[in-house]
Amino acid sequence: LLLRVKDMLDTTHRPAVVPTASIKEVIMEISEKRLGVTAVLEDNKVIGIITDGDIRRTMESREKDFFNLKAEDLMSIHPKLIYDTDKLISASNIMSQHKINSLLVCHG
């Protein structure tokens, strides 16, 4: 109950792309970091998130132009965030409430 998010944080795998990254770059980043998600950063600030589910859904809905897309075309602009100083139980509650598997962690 006393653990904080930073106590469980893996800082070696921090997937991130820029908004203009190609879909291939996005897929490579998600695959290399093996977390199923990547943050989209602009000037070192989080502006979005892309999950492997986002990629699959976009591939189905935009099949014809899929490989011409950029990260900014499929990112979710309101990612769920948590601070590394928050309690781990808070992260669990947020993920349960929103039915998600990952949160972006900010330093607080």
Image (cartoon, rainbow, N blue to C red):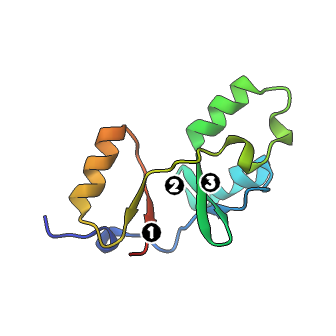
Q: Tell me the SS state at disc 1.
A: strand
Residue type at the position of mark 3: Ile
Residue identifier under label 2: 35
Task: Report the Cα–Cα distance between label 2 and label 3.
Answer: 6 Å
Residue identifier under label 1: 106
- Crowding around mark 3 (Cα neighbors within 10 Å: few <14, some 14 to 19, many 20+) is many
Residue 44 position (above or below residue 104): below
Quarter of the image with the C terminus is bottom left
Circle nearer the viewer, 1 or 3 = 1
* Occupied quadrant, residue 3: bottom left
Residue 46, image x, y percentages: 58, 62
Q: Earlier in the sequence, mark 1 or mark 3?
A: 3
Q: Tell me the SS state at disc 3.
A: helix
Residue 28, image x, y percentages: 71, 55
Q: Residue at the spot x=51%, y=74% of the render?
A: 12
Q: Residue at the spot x=28%, y=67% of the render?
A: 86
Relative horizontal placement of residue 96, taking residue 64 as reference (left or right): left
Residue type at the position of mark 2: Leu
Residue identifier under label 3: 30
Q: Residue at the spot x=31%, y=67% of the render?
A: 5
Please report contact status of discs 2 and 3: CB closer than 8 Å, yes or no.
yes
Residue 2, image x, y percentages: 15, 70
* Occupied quadrant, residue 57: top right
Task: Report the Cα–Cα distance between label 1 and label 2.
Answer: 17 Å
Q: Earlier in the sequence, mark 2 or mark 3?
A: 3
